[in-house]
Amino acid sequence: MSVDKNQLVLRVKLFGLLREAVGINEVTLILDDSYITVEGLKRDLLICYPVLAALNAPFVVAVNRKVADNNTKIAYCDEVALLPFVSGG
């Protein structure tokens, strides 16, 4: 895998139903910018992994172990995870 110095290699951990749907624990995206927002990440993941869109299951993005809003910027050194919503009582 050849990566340009201006590209961002981002590893995203998947959990629960999301991991089961994609079939792997972690996906890697190569992006043409030095950072991406959570909103951009969601968009790109749904394009690259249409099975996630087909699930129609809500999920949140955690950045560095904290749930992040859509405007949060993600950089190369950040730990990123997709977490399905969990309901309980």
Image (tube, grey):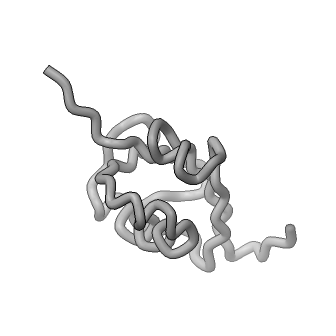
| Front residue of this view, candidates 28 and 57 | 57
Q: Please, is residue 76 above or below residue 36 in the view?
A: above
Q: Seen from this angle, which residue lies furthest left?
A: 89
Residue 79 appearing in the image: no
| Front residue of this view, candidates 10 and 88 | 88
Q: Please, is residue 52 above or below residue 81 in the view?
A: below
Percent x, y for residue 21? Answer: 53, 50
Instruction: Give the residue displayed 33% in from the left and 48% down from the top.
Output: 60
Q: Seen from this angle, which residue lies furthest top?
A: 89
Percent x, y for residue 45? Answer: 50, 66
Instruction: Give the residue displayed 62% in from the left and 79% down from the top.
Output: 32
Q: Quadrant of residue 76?
A: bottom right
Q: Is residue 24 left or right of residue 62?
A: right
Instruction: Give the residue displayed 29% in from the left and 62% down from the top.
Output: 70
Percent x, y for residue 14? Answer: 53, 44
Q: Quadrant of residue 67?
A: top left
Q: Please, is residue 45 above or below residue 22 in the view?
A: below
Instruction: Give the residue displayed 46% in from the left and 36% down from the top.
Output: 16
